[in-house]
Amino acid sequence: MLPQPQRREQQWSKYGLLERRYQVQSPSLQALYFVCLFSILIHFLSLGLDSVGFGYLQTTFGVLQLVGGPIFGRFADQFGTRAALILSCASGSVFFLLLSISTSIPILFLSRLPAVFMHGLPGAQKVITDLTAPSQRADALGKLGLCFGIGIIIGSHCNKPQVITTVSCSLCLTCINIILSDMSSSLGTSQSGSVFSIREILRLMKFPGVMEIFLVKVFSGFPIGLFLIMFSIISMDFFGLEAVESGYLMSYFGVLQMVVQGLVVGKLSKHCTERTLLRLSILVFAGVGLGMALMRTVWHYCIIALPLVFAFSMLGTITDSILTKAVPSSDTGTMLGICASVQPLTRTVGPTIGGVLYKRFGVHSFGYLQLIVNIVLFVYLLKSKIPLREQKAH
């Protein structure tokens, strides 16, 4: 009988070919998903939705994703990754189908309902987590983030909403067929409690270091998240950009995202511990806050964008890696679902808080808040002894 670590390494070696295939396939499917998601924004305007209505729509979407993330993760743990990905793609197909036939604002709001289980990224992260050794997890999760950059670049330049939504629905159905025909069976391993058990979800926060790292994940990017939520208004009022110029700026962000996620995160994870990278990302975030507090033109923002994307990508990847290692392997899906609820939380409360900050204190208030929050977090990380299961990739 082999010791547990050796059995695990044999298992990861056995699935080596499968891992490489799905590290390509999962980002590919997610890239298609984000292309569709970023390209349908123009559809909201064609139905006469104003800025207030758009805010309500974003809040509705955020609440549904916030509630659905941990539940989706529990579903993946109990019924397997294949079932979870099928659920996500099925929800996506219904979402895009309803969106394609949306002829009024009420139907547009109705199309948001399937979003409660539309969690393709946590599903793909679950695949990567199951098929990689802990020492290689940060690198693999970082490469998965490439899909977000591809989605931003292509999606921001698509301007035929009816065609895009119809194609998106078809792509989701195609993804279901791929998963059914090509993916090996993945059975759930979590046996305790119901999928909807709040106590089982909150139980994960009691593991050593989980609550601390999760709170760092939430608070470190919250101020900049508020800024990004308000960016459509800031780009016009503060930077004076037209819609086309905003699209080019989004493409620039997408390119930076691809470079950082594809090349930088993996390289650094092989040479530095996760504790070091976590502190580095927080420190860079503080510097980004200072830069935002001093910026005056869109060119200043383009310079700030590089460390901003680096900190965002590094923090998200490293915290996801740390948190999935801190819980039992049978609960990684739930943990990824909880991590996926951070952005919906920002989208839910962001429009209100961000609007107040921008109206009363101006655009530079986001930078000062970002600077203060991350300096406090950096000092906390330096002084605290948060237990981490650290392994550098080989």
Image (cartoon, helix red, strand yellow):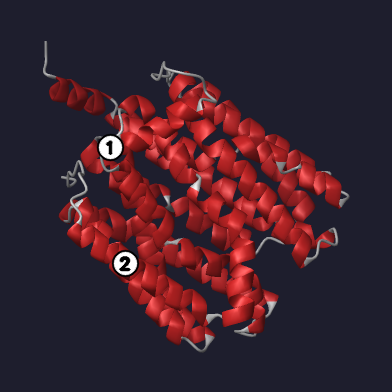
Percent from the top left, x then y, of residue 118? Answer: 60, 38
Quadrant in the picture for residue 5: top left
Query: Which residue is at 63% across, 37% downward?
Result: 116
Residue 170, percent from left and from top: 69, 37
Secondary structure under the numbered disc 1 in the rendered image: helix
Q: Quadrant of residue 371?
A: bottom left
The amino acid type of the residue labelled 1 equals Ala
Q: Residue furthest top?
A: 1
Label 1 to label 2, Cα distance in Å? Answer: 24 Å
Residue that carries the numbered disc 2 in the rendered image? 376
Q: 10 Å neighbourhood of mark 1: few (<14), some, or many (≥20)?
A: many
Instruction: Give the quarter of the figure containing the N terminus.
Output: top left
| Residue located farthest toward the right when viewing the structure as drawn | 103
Q: Is residue 106 left or right of residue 275?
A: right
The amino acid beneath tag 2 is: Val
Q: Which mark is residue 326?
A: 1
Precedes in sequence: disc 1 or disc 2: 1
The residue at the point 71 percent across, 39 percent down is 113
State the residue in front, 287 or 366.
Answer: 366
